[in-house]
Amino acid sequence: MKVLVYSAKDFEIPYLEQANHRKHQLTFFEDALSSETTMEAVGFDAISIFSADEADFITVEKLKGFGVNYITLRSVGHDNVNLRTASRLNLKVANIPAYSPYAIAEHAVALLLALNRKLIESNFRVNHYNFNLNNLVGFDLNNKTIGIIGTGKIGSVMSKIMHGFGCKLLGYDVEKNNELVDKYHMQYTTLENLCNKADIISLHVPLTTETYQMINEDLIYEMKDDVILINTARGSVINTEDVIEGLKKGKIGALGIDVYEKEKGVFFKDCSQDLPDDDLLLILNAMPNVLITGHHAFLTDEALTNIAQTTIYNLDCWESGQESEYELTEIN
Ligand code: NAD
């Protein structure tokens, strides 16, 4: 199968090539899929995309018109693909449902620990031979309450890790996971109650119309003072302006994000010589109690291996005329 891999990054190409074993003709293209770059897919049977690629209504229509019949996502999230249009046009779409929930959950914990124990500031001081400890006080995680919003695959691993730290777990999800209740004494509750009680809140829901800007002014009002908010899910699950207000007022004590509402076109690129025209990002970057990573929670050897293997598996299935078990439908 002839496959155009959009948003191909140097760090993932060796994994894809190794998983492929020269079965499919992979062409790596650095730019993201957008209505402007769709033309590149002419002559390909399939494309592979990541979270920064945009397969909206028009793009999907164009792709089908160019003869592309398959889209294999190298991500869990698929909010960037118009599945309704794809399904109408019989263009098959598959994702990687679980390449490593550990990678994401562990990264969420890394953000939490770095913020709580002020590791960035501490290291900055040490680099300047300033060994003063003022304003570096954190708190024990033991006995604190963490609210986990979205208790699916990543939220479950997060629950296990935080239980290990001695935290009490509050959960919010449309579907209760009884294993978390039995093993880690998770208490499911309402979103408001979770916000009232949690010292730390970690987001693990997909981006959907229901979760879009779920964390907004009203919910922030319900949160405990000085709450630590961690978002490794999708940027638009939080209303960034409202969160900045919460940080300014001291309602939110610290914010750790691996994803950002306006990350498209900025993340995954070196913008150091031409700063993004984005005041919200500049404000967040200037705040000492905000820690931002550029959507790299997935960046572990295990996750990249699984992403590559499942991408090739999806292509193998389609080439042999079979369905992939990871195909997405409109209701996913
Ligand atoms: P999952 O499907 O296993 O879990 C998602 C959970 O959210 C499910 O339990 C579901 O019931 C719940 N949910 C869905 N809609 C909800 C709503 N409206 N209210 C409450 N709960 C709701 O998915 P996962 O593998 O745990 O991944 C979660 C998300 O993490 C992905 O959708 C993706 O956006 C994000 N993610 C980010 C990275 C990264 O690199 N930062 C990597 C992978 C995944």
Image (cartoon, rainbow, N blue to C red):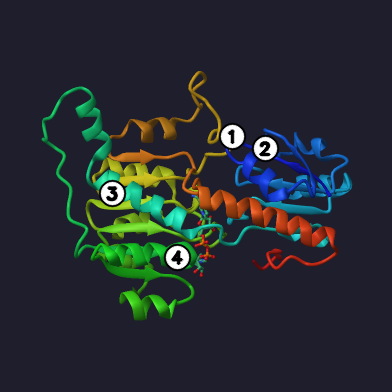
Badge 1 amino acid: Gly
- Looking at marks 3 and 1 on the same chain, the residue that comes earlier in the sequence is marked by 3
Lateral position of residue 1 relative to residue 116, left or right? right
Q: Provide residue 119's location: percent of width, then percent of height.
A: 25, 39
User: Dot 1 corresponds to which residue?
Assistant: 265
Q: Which quarter of the picture shows residue 180?
A: bottom left
Question: Quick check: 287 above or below 273?
Answer: below
Q: Which mark is residue 217?
A: none
Lateral position of residue 120 relative to residue 51, left or right? left
Badge 2 amino acid: Ala
Q: Provide residue 257's location: percent of width, then percent of height.
A: 40, 45
User: Dot 4 corresponds to which residue?
Assistant: 150
Question: Quick check: 177 above or below 300?
Answer: below
Using a 10 Å C-alpha cutoff, classify the residue at mark 2 as few (fewer than 14 neighbours), some (14 to 19) or many (20 or more).
many
- Looking at marks 1 and 2 on the same chain, the residue that comes earlier in the sequence is marked by 2
User: Dot 3 corresponds to which residue?
Assistant: 113
- Looking at marks 1 and 4 on the same chain, the residue that comes earlier in the sequence is marked by 4
Distance in Å between CA atoms under marks 4 and 2: 28 Å
- Looking at marks 3 and 4 on the same chain, the residue that comes earlier in the sequence is marked by 3
Q: Element type at marker 2?
A: loop
Q: Nearer the viewer, mark 3 or mark 4?
A: 3
Badge 4 amino acid: Gly
The residue that appears at 37% across and 32% down in the rendered structure is 285
Distance in Å between CA atoms under marks 1 and 4: 27 Å
Instruction: Work out whether residue 214 or residue 229 is closer to the camera in this orientation and state it.
Output: 229
Distance in Å between CA atoms under marks 3 and 4: 20 Å
Badge 3 amino acid: Leu
Distance in Å between CA atoms under marks 3 and 1: 29 Å
